[in-house]
Image (spheres, rainbow, N blue to C red):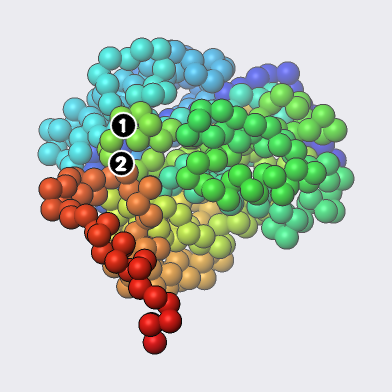
Amino acid sequence: MFLVISMTKITVSIIKCDVGGWPGHSSTHPRLEAVARDRLQKAKGSEKIFDFEATHVGDDLNLILTHQNGPDDEEIHSIAFDVFEGATEEAKRLGLYGAGQDLLSDAFSGNVRGMGPGVAELEFTKRTSEPILAFLMDKTEPGAFNLPIYKMFADPFSTAGLVIDPNLNHGFTFEVWDVKEHTRVFLNTPEDSYKLLALIGAKERFVIKRIFPKDEHKLPSDEPVVAVSTEKLVDVAGEYVGKDDPVALVRAQSGLPAVGEVLEPFSFPHLVSGWMRGSHNGPIMPVSMDDADCTRFDGPPRVVGLGFNLDVDHNLVGPVDHFDDPAFDNARQKAADITDYMRQHGPFEPHRLPLEEMEYTTLPGILDTLEDQWEGVEEDYQKAETVNVGEVE
């Protein structure tokens, strides 16, 4: 049974930024969140936004905003930029590590894309009841969302509604970005599932950006139900400046996966890239807000899941801390066991990322120190090629 849909369009935005770690890359100082709340409250009082939530995971400050300005709006992004500038100044005063690390420019130019912060935004026609979940990650890459988002909206072993609910049985349309070539493609499930998996399995390059209902749905097919931040800091800065730490927004219920189906994929702590110095593979651990501080080896990578409803005045009713639940204890234990296993590899792959993914880390600086020490071995190879195979015992 579908809920009545109103004609009110609403925008929900997550805009996040690392403005200083406490200490190192572990956590976010409460003063930074206080600065954010103070400035956002002023924006709410001036009716620039309807409501907000300021929170963190690891050393990332996350702003969740509701408004009616649409995605990439200059006024909304200016509010976020002002918050991050104020938080950066407070971080400098407190002597926090990497103050303003992700704020790569001090000159706002219309929106924060390309300036370091990550952005995920949904504009949609609000339903009578609008459940929406915000997922916040730290110490990992945008492609870390590929597997759980796929399972939410395309895997019937995870989302039963794809099989037993006629409102989901049509599947969905996935918008996938090639973050290397800066192109995109739209693929439909279930018919394009194998092609979709061929791409998003290479999570360092192909990233799920948005998901849309199909025309067969009773929801508007041009209004996304999922949005993921795809900003890669190496593409912005051209060098290692931190992890990408993605965020995602997911709408749920009434023609979409149920809240429990949205959460289910995180019961598997799949391997993601990032972790210490952005240079290692490790498990993503679903944690409550109380455990959202990255410690062991600056990790392991964390994900927080916050659930909201939107009330009649577009306020955020919540959050519900979804991973503050013993049902995810096994996932956390498994992540801890995988952490032990991966860490025992030390500097060896596959714990450390392959060389092509280390290009923008600090490793090239080590290779530069050896530049004049390499010697040719061509002569030795030529000698080896002349050895008669019959002479080798």
- Is 4 placed left or right of 44 in the picture? right
Q: Mark 2 and mark 1 in contact? Answer it, CB < 8 Å.
A: yes
- Name the kind of residue labelled 2 in the image: Tyr
- At 38% across and 82% down in the image, what residue appears? 392
Q: Which residue is mark 1?
A: 238
How many marks the image carries: the answer is: 2
Q: Residues within 10 Å of mark 1 (few under 14, many from 20)?
A: few
Rate crowding at label 2 as few (under 14), some (14 to 19) or many (20 or more) other CA atoms within 10 Å.
Answer: many
Q: Residue at x 75, y 38 (%)?
A: 188
Question: Residue at image x 80%, y 44%?
Answer: 191
Compare residues 188 and 223 and report the one nearer the observer: 188
Q: Residue furthest bottom?
A: 393
Q: Quadrant of the N terminus?
A: top right
Q: Is 70 displayed left or right of 106 in the figure? A: right
Question: Which residue is identified by label 2?
Answer: 360
* SS at circle 2: loop
For residue 170, what is the image quadrant?
top right
Q: Position of residue 14 (x, y in %)?
A: 47, 32
Quick one: 24 or 9, which is closer to the camera?
24
Name the residue type under label 1: Gly
Q: Residue 16, located in which quarter of the rendered image? A: top left
Q: Is residue 123 left or right of residue 232?
A: right
Quadrant assignment for the C terminus: bottom left
Q: Position of residue 85 (x, y in %)?
A: 26, 24
- For the point 54% across and 20% down, the residue is 71
On the question of residue 129 being in view, the answer is no
Quadrant in the rendering for residue 298: bottom left
In the rendering, which numbered label is found on residue 346? none
State which tag comes first along the sequence, 2 or 1: 1
